[in-house]
Image: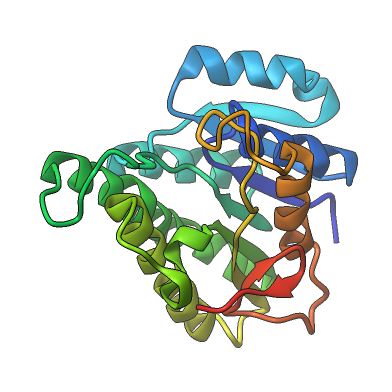
Amino acid sequence: MAQPIALVTGANRGIGLETCRQLLNAGYRVILTSRNEQKGQEAARQLGGSGAGAVFRQLDVAIPESIAALKEFVESEFGRLDVLVNNAAIHYDTWQEVTAPDFTTVDEAITTNLLGPWRLCAALIPLMRKNRWGRIVNVSSGSGSLHRMGSETPAYGITKAALNALTIKLAKATARDGILVNAVCPGWVRTDMGGAGAPRSVAQGAASVMWAVQLPDDGPTGGFFRDGKRVEW
């Protein structure tokens, strides 16, 4: 296969940026996307820009027109897509009570954390099907695990549980296309969202994502993993 093309959302910082770095080190051509154009361009510069194999493209996953423009760019510039990492997410809402939520926050979380990845997959899976090969990694969270779910972070947890369900549906739909679709929990990571007290480094969190990116053709699909090990739904 020619140099594989990978696209990462929410990639101007944290796990998204580190995933881009690890992808570049593994020989991928990387499309780094973020909602904030200035921060995204700066992140691409940190990685060495196009000379290192990274190219920035502005993307707001909450806006369908932005997704459509991205698809047009990928198709015209590369004609293919091999890896999609749905990393962008908002509203780790520790301040909310599920019995009295701010539904504006809930709506925003649904639009970004669930509908964004769903729309991106619908737009970009055809580019993977052309070559009958692809890897989709949905960056999820233990907050979305029904097995251990509490009442905290309602908007974030419920949208991550829904992202896990989407993962299963997409995996079933692409099972004969050479596309593997998995959800990954990077763990509690020292990012802006995770906080300075988190026990795991950004590199460790991104390594979980990379495990799913680099699965062999007979690897699992439709699963939920952390560090290459299954997480209970």
Residue 50 shown left or right of residue 59 in the figure = right
Q: In this view, does 154 lie above or below 214?
A: above
State the residue at coordinates (73%, 56%).
208
Q: Determine the image quadrant of residue 218.
A: bottom right
Instruction: From the viewer's side, name the closer residue of 197 and 134.
Output: 197
Quadrant including the N terminus:
bottom right
Q: In this view, does 78 lie above or below 2?
A: above
Q: Which colour scheme is used?
A: rainbow
- Residue at image coords 67%, 32%: 17
Q: Which residue is drawn at 62% across and 28% down?
A: 196
| Residue 4 on image: x %, y % | 78, 52
User: Is residue 182 something one can see in this rendering?
Assistant: yes
Left or right, residue 36 beside residue 115: right
Observer able to see residue 81: no
User: Could you tell me residue 172's position as x and y percent?
Assistant: 50, 86
Residue 201: x, y in percent? 75, 39
Q: Which of the two residues, 4 or 148, is positioned nearer the viewer here?
A: 148
Q: How many numbered discs?
A: 0
Residue 61's place in the image compared with 209, above or below, is above
> In the image, what residue occupies the spot 67% across and 28% down?
55
Q: Name the side, left or right, on which 159 lies relative to 96.
A: right
Q: Which x, y percent locates residue 50?
A: 76, 23
